[in-house]
Amino acid sequence: MNSGTKTEKVEDTSRQEEFAFLFAQLVMQQSNMAMMLLGKVAHPESGKVFQDVDAARLFIDQLEMLEVKTKGNLSKEEESLLKQTLMTLRLNFVQTVESPSTAEHPKPAATPPEATPSAEAANPTEGQEHSASGDDEHRKKFSKKY
């Protein structure tokens, strides 16, 4: 009977360690996606750098939700990881949003000027008008600050 209790404790411990690893992996995955969408890290497959501030905000918001919903249920290490990650992401978010180059002249960071999508190549004036006004309008609507 006593050996069964030891086995259960070992299984519980290993399961808790697995959950701790999965939690850290989830936080890092969300963080990496946010950093990529903020234009701070290149896409791992294409190697291109691009920005989608609204999508980055979604990943940061998800981590904030996780922080609120798990309050009091995390180990000190997990809590520290989440808090540090959120602080870093918020600082990068503010830098990206307040950066004069992205606010006034939105452009993909790694796309050369000669590389244009086929739809814009077929109708260059229509694609450019939509792209420029759409990006400006998109940025004007954004107002959340961390």
Image (spheres, grey):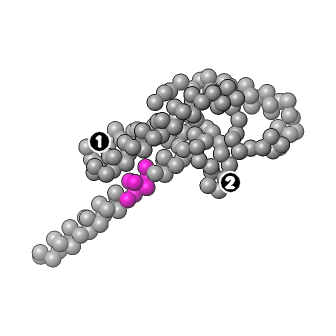
Magenta highlight range? 21-27
Residue 138 in view: no
Question: Of callouts 2 and 1, which one flags the residue occurring earlier in the amino acid sequence?
Answer: 2
* Secondary structure type for disc 2: loop
Q: Give the residue drawn at x 69%, y 32%.
A: 106
- Which quarter shows the N terminus? bottom left
- Res 103 quadrant in image: top right
Relative vertical location of residue 110 with respect to residue 103 in this rendering, above or below: below
- Look at mark 2 in the image and give the residue it sits on: 46
Q: Nearer the viewer, mark 2 or mark 1?
A: 2
- Look at mark 1 in the image and give the residue it sits on: 71
Could you tell me residue 22's position as x and y percent? 39, 57
Magenta span main SS: helix
Could you tell me residue 16's position as x and y percent? 29, 60
* Secondary structure type for disc 1: loop
Q: Give the residue drawn at x 78%, y 43%.
A: 112
Amino acid type assigned to the residue bearing label 2 in the image: Ser
Q: Give the residue drawn at x 43%, y 49%.
A: 27
Could you tell me residue 87's position as x and y percent? 42, 38
Residue 132 left/right relative to 145: right
List the single residue furthest toward the left.
2
- Res 65 quadrant in image: top left
Residue 1 in view: yes
The answer to which of 24 and 109 lies nearer the viewer is 109
**Magenta region includes residue 6:** no
Cα separation, mark 2 vs mark 1, equals 37 Å
Residue 12 left/right relative to 38: left
Q: Residues within 10 Å of mark 2 (few under 14, many from 20)?
A: few
